[in-house]
Image (cartoon, rainbow, N blue to C red):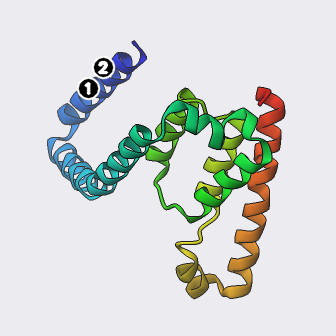
Amino acid sequence: MENLILYGVTLILVILSFVKDRKKTYQAMKKAWKAFENILPQFLAVIVLVGIMLSVLNPDMIGRLLGKASGWWGIFLAVMVGSITLIPGFVAFPTAAMLVGRGAGYAQIGAFISSLMMVGIVTLPIEFKYFGKKVSILRNFLAFLFSFLVAFIIGKVMGG
């Protein structure tokens, strides 16, 4: 129901924008379409990979690797995978919800999302270029440690 409300409000606002200034609305829609076209290949690739992963890893396997019972080992695994993975946030959060639905623990998924958003092993060369090696390594190391703190807090709050 919430989605219908959001779509309705969006449609009304686009119509109002169109009535106010057709040219600007058309330009904005054109820019939005270009952005969508740029994001679509990454989005589809990640969806395909997640689909394959979810079909290969049954809920029992996800529970063993990332479930509440996996404890700190599962959190460590989640932080490592999150640190080396490059997934946009708009894909990461639905993926996390799917994993929780299939048996992953909250602390483990908190660690995964935290490291995914803050630690950038793949993007480290770019960081070196702009921030220097020392700052980049320190930032990534602190973000890595912070991911464990996030997992601990989420584990305490959510009970697992």
In the image: residue 13, left or right of residue 50: left
**Residue in the image at 33% along x and 56% along y:** 42
Q: Secondary structure at mark 2?
A: helix
Q: Nearer the viewer, residue 95 or 104?
A: 104
Residue at image x 64%, y 64%? 119
Check disc 1 and report the residue beneath it.
11
Note whether 85 is above or below 60 in the view shown: below
For badge 2, the amino acid type reads Gly
The local secondary structure at tag 1 comes to helix
Judge by depth and name the residue closer to the eye, 75 or 127: 75
- Location of the C terminus (image quadrant): top right
Give the labeled residue for mark 2. Answer: 8
Q: Number of labelled discs?
A: 2
Q: Residue at x 75, y 70 (%)?
A: 141
Q: Is residue 82 above or below residue 152?
A: below
Place residue 56 in its image quadrant: top left
Gap in angstroms between the C-alphas marked 2 and 1: 5 Å
- In the drawing, does residue 155 fall left or right of residue 38? right
Vertical placement of residue 103 versus 48, above or below: above
Q: Are the residues flagged by discs 2 and 1 in contact, CB closer than 8 Å?
A: yes
The quarter in which the N terminus is drawn is top left
The residue under the point 59% across, 71% down is 121
Q: Position of residue 39 (x, y in %)?
A: 31, 55
> For the residue marked with disc 1, what is the amino acid?
Leu
